[in-house]
Amino acid sequence: MALRFQQHPGLVVYLTAGDTGLSPADGATPSSHAAGLNATRAIALAAIDAGADVIELGVPFSDPVGDGPVIQRASERALARGTTLKDVLTLAAELREARPNIGLIIFTYLNPVLRFGMAKFADAVAAAGADGVLIIDLIVEEAAEYLAEMERVKLAPIFLAAPTSTDERLAAIAQHSKGFVYAISRTGVTGQRKNVAADAAALVERIRRWTRLPVAVGFGISNADHVAQVAEFADAAVIGSAIVELIESTARRVEGRSTEGQAPGAVSRFIEGLRQPLSAQAL
C-alpha cells in the first residue's frame, strides 16, 4: 500500500502503542499487557473509520527526548504494561489485515531499532505490512544503513524537516524521503500549542523547492482551526499529542470502574471534526 492522502487536508494520526490512558494498577501482567494493545487497536480502527489517512504507531521508549510531557507519560504507561517493539509490529499486521488501504507508519527512536537489529527490523516491518518508518532521532546525514535497508525491503523512509534545517539538509531530506516529508512546525518537543507557528508555511515553501512529495505538518496541531491553517499551504496535518491527551483524559477510574473503553468513540468524534474549522462548528 503506497502512502497517499485521500482527502485535503490529509490527516496523519499518531498513537503510542500499548497506552490505554491509565497506568496498570498491578504493573505489567498478561491481562494489562493485552489490554494496552487491544485499546490501541480499537482506537486506531476508530481513527481510520473517522477519516485518518495514515496511522503512526509509536514504539514506546524510556527516554523520548523529542516528545513533550503528554507523549512521555503515554510511553511510560505503555512500557509499564510491557509493550515491546515486537508487540507494535504485531499490532501493525493486525491493522493492515483489518484496514488494507490505510497508510501505516512505524514511529520510533533509534535505540529500539539498534537493539532489534537494523536488517531484522526492516524485514519485520515489511512483513507486518507497514508502509514506512520514521526514526525521530536519526538525521539524514547518518542514515546510510537505514536507507539501504528501507530500499531493500521497499519501505518508505520518512525524515523530519525543521525550520532550522539548512538548505543542504532539506535537499538531502527531499532526495531520500518517500511517501511524504514531515515538516516540524516549530523547534522543540511535541505538544499542543494555541497557534500554528508562522515558520511552518515558510518551511513548506522551502521543502517544495526540492520535492513534489506531499508535505505533512506536525508538532502543535491540535484542533480544526489548526488543520484548516495547515491546509492553506501543506498537504496534510499530523495530530499526536492532542489525541494522546484525549485518550488520557477519557480514561478515568470512577468508583473503581475504568472508563478506558470510551476512548475509541472520543477519538472518532475528535477526528471527524478536524476537517471542519471551529468557527464553522459554532454556527
Image: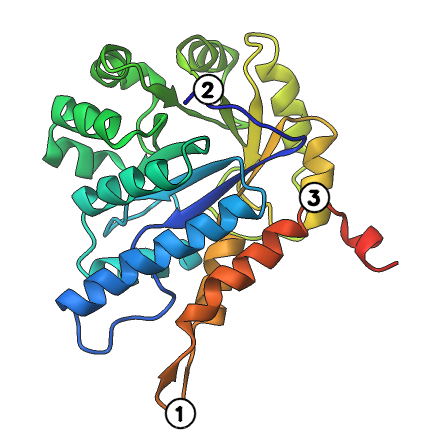
Image location of residue 6, percent across then percent down? 60, 28
Q: Residue at x 35, y 25 (%)?
A: 132
Mark 3 or mark 1: whose residue is earlier in sequence: 1
State the separation of the CA atoms marked 3 and 1. Answer: 36 Å
Camera-side residue of 165 and 275: 275
Instruction: Report crowding for label 1: few under 14, some 14 to 19, many 20 or more residues within 10 A (C-alpha).
Output: few
Q: Amino acid at mark 2?
A: Gly
Quarter of the rendering occupied by the C terminus: bottom right
Q: Secondary structure at mark 2?
A: loop
Q: Which residue is mark 1?
A: 255
Instruction: Give me the residue at 69% from left, 48% from top.
Output: 224
Q: Which residue is mark 3?
A: 275
Relative vertical location of residue 210 with respect to residue 159 in this rendering, above or below: above
Q: Position of residue 192 (x, y in %)?
A: 56, 53
Residue at disc 3, secondary structure: loop
Question: Can residue 153 be seen here?
Answer: yes
The percent coordinates of residue 64 (x first, y second) are 31, 47
Give the camera-side residue of 229 and 33.
33
Q: Is residue 9 above or below residue 14?
A: above
Q: Position of residue 71 (x, y in %)?
A: 40, 54
Q: Which mark is first along the chain, 1 or 2?
A: 2
Type of amino acid at the residue the image marks with label 3: Arg
Q: Residues within 10 Å of mark 2 (few under 14, many from 20)?
A: some
| Residue that carries the numbered disc 2 in the rendered image | 179
Q: Nearer the viewer, residue 3 or 58?
A: 3
Residue 35 vs residue 215: left or right?
Answer: left
Q: In 3D space, how far apart are the residues under numbered discs 3 and 2 (Cα atoms)? A: 22 Å
Instruction: Indicate how the structure is coloured in the image.
Output: rainbow
The N terminus appears in which quarter of the rendering? top left
Residue 119: name its quadrant.
top left
